[in-house]
């Protein structure tokens, strides 16, 4: 189901003004990933105001509009709890931060073609996860571990799904996107409601 989860993330970034490049259309299962297979997608927002930095480590939709470019890795462990123990357990969460992987990122973005200067050639490293632990000290401990490994920010699936649901208008037809069209149909038949004024982890 990783392809489906990545499509959810892709739709989210595209609706928020990003160009998205999905680096592969296949899933690696029977062998160890090559270093060029660790990153799920690249995102690029030409309209981002690079002078404004996101306020926190956990990113929301009003934060990501200030991100110029980033590498994104999706960890769709929907049925598992994300804890500090998982981060320490060698689950390969941080494999995309290895030097061999990051050294290829500039080639992926092709800065010469984009006519970007050296000061612009800085990319964020974003991790998509189900959620952070809600209680302390596990929440703070998880954030510290992620930062120490070089993660610049995380986005929860709840944030992504909330944004997608809010963005879909029932009087529009989204025939070019199965996911968005499904959300529209579910909203038409009152199967899902607009997210309430609550904050998601």
Image (spheres, helix red, strand yellow):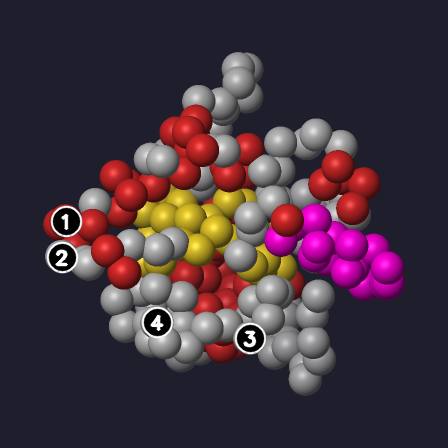
Mark positioned earlier in the residue sequence (1 or 3):
3
Measured Cα–Cα span from mark 3 to mark 2: 28 Å
From which residue to which does the magenta span run? 132-147
User: According to the image, label 3 marks what residue?
Assistant: 55
Q: Residue furthest front?
A: 119
Looking at the rendered image, the quarter that the N terminus falls into is top right
Measured Cα–Cα span from mark 4 to mark 1: 19 Å
Mark positioned earlier in the residue sequence (4 or 2):
4
- 137 with respect to 39 (left or right): right
Using the image, determine if residue 23 lies above or below residue 150.
above
Using the image, determine if residue 88 lies above or below residue 42.
above
Look at the numbered discs 4 and 1 and tell me whether their residues touch, using CB distance below 8 Å.
no
Mark positioned earlier in the residue sequence (4 or 1):
4
Mark positioned earlier in the residue sequence (4 or 3):
4
Residue at the location (45% across, 62% down)? Answer: 12
Q: Residue furthest bottom?
A: 197
Looking at the rendered image, the quarter that the C terminus falls into is bottom right
- 99 with respect to 160 (left or right): left
User: According to the image, label 1 marks what residue?
Assistant: 112
Mark positioned earlier in the residue sequence (3 or 2):
3
User: According to the image, label 2 marks what residue?
Assistant: 115
Between 165 and 99, the one nearer to me in the picture:
99
Residue at the location (29% across, 43% down)? Answer: 106
What is the number of the mark on residue 50? 4
The secondary structure that most of the magenta stretch takes on is: helix
The location of residue 22, given as percent across then percent down, is 36, 43
Look at the numbered discs 4 and 2 and tell me whether their residues touch, using CB distance below 8 Å.
no
């Amino acid at each position: 189901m990783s392809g489906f989860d990545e499509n959810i993330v892709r739709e989210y970034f595209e609706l928020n003004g990003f160009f998205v490049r999905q680096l592969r259309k296949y899933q690696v299962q029977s062998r160890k990933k090559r270093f060029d297979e660790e990153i799920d997608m690249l995102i690029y927002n030409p309209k981002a105001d690079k002078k404004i930095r996101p306020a926190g480590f956990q990113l929301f939709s009003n934060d990501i509009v200030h991100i110029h470019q980033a590498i994104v890795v999706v960890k769709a462990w929907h049925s598992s709890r994300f804890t500090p123990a998982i981060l320490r357990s060698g689950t390969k969460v941080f494999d995309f931060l290895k030097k061999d992987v990051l050294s290829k990122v500039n080639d992926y973005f092709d800065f010469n073609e984009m006519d970007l200067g050296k000061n612009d050639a800085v990319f964020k490293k974003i991790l998509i996860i189900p959620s952070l632990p809600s209680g302390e000290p596990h929440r703070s401990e998880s954030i510290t571990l992620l930062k120490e490994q070089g993660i610049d920010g995380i986005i929860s699936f709840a944030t992504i799904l909330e944004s997608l649901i809010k963005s879909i208008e029932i009087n529009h037809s989204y025939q070019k996107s199965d996911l968005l069209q499904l959300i529209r149909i579910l909203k038409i038949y009152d199967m899902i409601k607009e997210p309430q004024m609550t904050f998601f982890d």
